[in-house]
Amino acid sequence: MSAASEAPRPGDVALAAGRRRLHYSARMRATLLLVIAGVVVVLDQASKILARSTIESGDYIGLVPGFGLTRVRNEGIAFGLFPGRPELVAALTVVALIAIGIAVARTARRSLAVAIGGGMLIGGSLGNLIDRVARGGVTDFLDPVAWPAFNAADVGIVCGVALIVLGLTFFDGEG
């Protein structure tokens, strides 16, 4: 064989480089997703510990007009659905987390926004699950006047879903 026939063709080199880039990019997005999920869980749990140690249950601390801090315990799921049924709520959360994990794992490689949003969504869901399992209910403390109290995990969940939707809608398949 001649040296020319052993040399890779330019198209093969470009294809191999593209595959390496996609593999690296997918691995980096998966790592980013896990790091963000961990950060959301830590921030959520730390803020709940602070709220439980500094705010008496039911007390209101006004911060700015229309927004303050009130420590409440939510034994249900979103907006207090299924109160008094912590086993059901925890089971629904675990099922939702598994489904979310599968869906995010399949789509996070398609968009950086989806990977970031997936990390926020998973981290927020885990943060609230920790409360449900350890305390029988979720500590909520961020209290806007016209909305039920919520917590950092809820912020992660809502922002995560928004980023996933934006990522799949506007940035699907971006590099």
Image (spheres, rainbow, N blue to C red):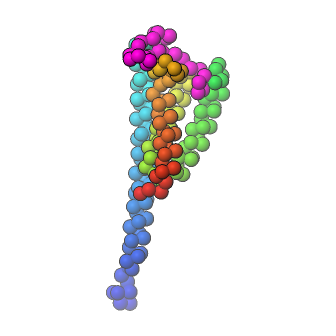
Residue at 52 percent across and 22 percent down: it is 147
Q: Is residue 151 visible?
A: yes
Q: Quadrant of the C terminus?
A: bottom left
Q: Is residue 92 above or below residue 50?
A: below
The answer to whether residue 24 is left or right of residue 87 is left
Q: Quadrant of residue 78?
A: top right
Q: Is residue 34 above or below residue 45?
A: below
Q: Nearer the viewer, residue 108 or 144?
A: 144
Residue at 65 percent across and 23 percent down: it is 82
Q: Position of residue 77 (x, y in %)?
A: 60, 26
Farthest bottom residue in view: 1
Residue stretch rendered in magenta on the structure: 56-80
- Is residue 68 magenta-colored? yes
Q: Position of residue 90 (x, y in %)?
A: 61, 29
- Is residue 19 magenta-colored? no
Q: Is residue 134 above or below residue 157?
A: above
Q: Position of residue 103 (x, y in %)?
A: 56, 47
Q: Nearer the viewer, residue 111 or 52?
A: 111
Q: Position of residue 89 (x, y in %)?
A: 62, 27
Residue at 37 percent across and 77 percent down: it is 10
Residue at 50 percent across and 10 percent down: it is 58
Total labels: the figure holds: 0
Q: Quadrant of the N terminus?
A: bottom left
